Image (tube, rainbow, N blue to C red):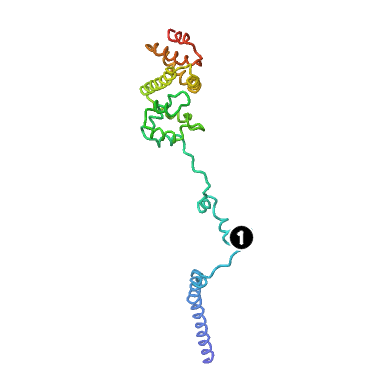
Amino acid sequence: MDLLTNILIWAGILIAVVVVALAVHEFIWKPRQQGLDGETARSPAPSASPAVAAAPQPEQPAEDGGGTGSMVADRVPIAEAAVIEGDEHAPAPAVVPAEQFKRLSRSQRLGLARLTTMPASFDRVAGLAVAACKEADFDAILASGLIQTDPEGERFTLTEQGRTLGAEHLTPEDGELVRQFHTEHFSRLVEKVHATDLEDREAAVEGFELVQEEWPHLLSVLERLSQQEGREREFLKFSEAVNATGIFQTRTDDGIRWCTG
């Protein structure tokens, strides 16, 4: 009986030890091991040592036979490559007529506006007489690109944009004033030829060239004088002076008819 009791006691003790061991393993050692494994998984990978990082990387051959530099150039966008290389042959951005006009000073804009009354090309003397501005301002107007110059550099013509921009800044009062300047200038030219001896060959050639070259301006003066009351005498004098060159295409009688209506 005592032997059986001892066996049972030791069997119970052994079972208790096994149960305790299993409990410790299940609830203490196993969770702790899982925690260590998780921290190892979350830890960052060790970085390369400075010696390894500083080591030059082997060049990769480019498909076109170039080195690494050509590969980098291939990756640079076209716009950035143009900035890096600095295209010296790229055309400068064109300046629009409105910007050209804005660059003129106030007096230069006024001079350009007055020149819009010119019906055709004109020389420097006529331009200065009509624009009534300083020569420096006149030169600035010529350099603005709003006026074209002939190959000889002697006659000038307003561009379409220059005429449009200038006309917008010409007041009716100033327009009437400069048209009077225009009439007076070309009247003086004709009077000068008329006052010379037209029998002289040189004077006759001068009169011929004057009418041929300035005919649009002379016609404009004739029309202006014929339409204004009280200027009949000026019209007749002007038409006779032009007619005296032998080139005038309108007879004095026609001029009288224009004046009398």
Near-viewer residue (130 or 65): 130
Give the quadrant of residue 111.
top left
Q: In the rendered image, which residue does mark 1 sit on?
A: 66
Label 1 crowding class (10 Å Cα cut-off): few <14, some 14-19, many 20+?
few
Horizontal and vertical percent position of residue 12? 51, 84
Front residue of this view, candidates 248 and 113:
248
Rendered view: 230 above or below 59: above
Give the image location of residue 205, x and y in percent.
Answer: 50, 21
Nearer to us in this view, 3 or 93: 93
Q: Residue at x 43, y 15 (%)?
A: 238
Is 206 on the left or on the right of 176, as rendered? right
Residue 173 on image: x %, y %: 35, 22
113 sits to left or right of 94: left
Above/below status of 139 relative to 222 = below
Q: Position of residue 121 (x, y in %)?
A: 48, 26
In the rendered view, tell whether residue 44 sits above or below residue 140.
Answer: below
Seen in the picture, residue 180 relative to 15 is either above or below; the reply is above
- Looking at the figure, which quarter contains the C terminus? top left
**Secondary structure found at label 1:** loop
Q: Residue at x 52, y 46 (%)?
A: 90
Kind of residue sitting beneath label 1? Gly
